[in-house]
Amino acid sequence: MELQIIQNKIYEIRGQRVMLDFDLAELYGTETKRLKEAVRRNMERIEGNDFMFQLTKDEIEILSRTQFATLNKNQQ
């Protein structure tokens, strides 16, 4: 996967640079639910408390609008 494609999938949320679960799953060539299962099974291997967090409904809505605006801009 090209670096630019990966960079476009990095968002800043709560002051953290993050990738969304479905983008990571695509990057690794798996389903989102399989990625989440693997993370849950291996929590003891993950260091720190900032590895992942769940978005609030407001954050999802804002992110969705941002992605939609970006898609529209790229299609013009």
Image (cartoon, rainbow, N blue to C red):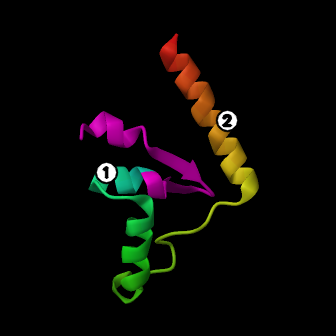
Residue drawn at the location 57% of the way across and 20% of the way down: 72
Q: Is residue 12 shown above or below 48?
A: above
Q: Is residue 10 shown above or below 57?
A: above
Report the side of 49 relative to 59 (left or right). Answer: left
Task: Give the labeled residue for mark 2.
Answer: 65
The front one of 2 and 31 is: 31
**Toward which corner of the image does residue 70 lie, by quadrant?**
top right
Tell me the SS state at disc 1.
Answer: helix
Residue reaching furthest to the left? 1
Residue drawn at the location 51% of the way across and 47% of the way down: 11
What are the residue bounds of the magenta stretch?
Answer: 1-22
Q: Position of residue 13 (x, y in %)?
A: 60, 53
Q: Is residue 55 shown above or below 36?
A: above
Residue 11 drawn in magenta? yes
Residue drawn at the location 61% of the way across and 66% of the way down: 54
Report the side of 24 relative to 55 (left or right). Answer: left
Report the side of 41 relative to 61 (left or right). Answer: left
Q: Quadrant of the N terminus?
A: top left
Q: Position of residue 32 (x, y in %)?
A: 43, 60
Residue reaching furthest to the bottom? 44
Amino acid, disc 1: Leu
Tell me the SS state at disc 2.
Answer: helix
**Toward which corner of the image does residue 39 lie, by quadrant?**
bottom left
The front one of 47 and 39 is: 39
Q: Position of residue 7 (x, y in %)?
A: 37, 41
Task: Give the labeled residue for mark 1.
Answer: 27
Residue drawn at the location 58% of the way across and 35% of the way down: 67
Q: Position of residue 46 (x, y in %)?
A: 38, 81
Q: Earlier in the sequence, mark 2 or mark 1?
A: 1
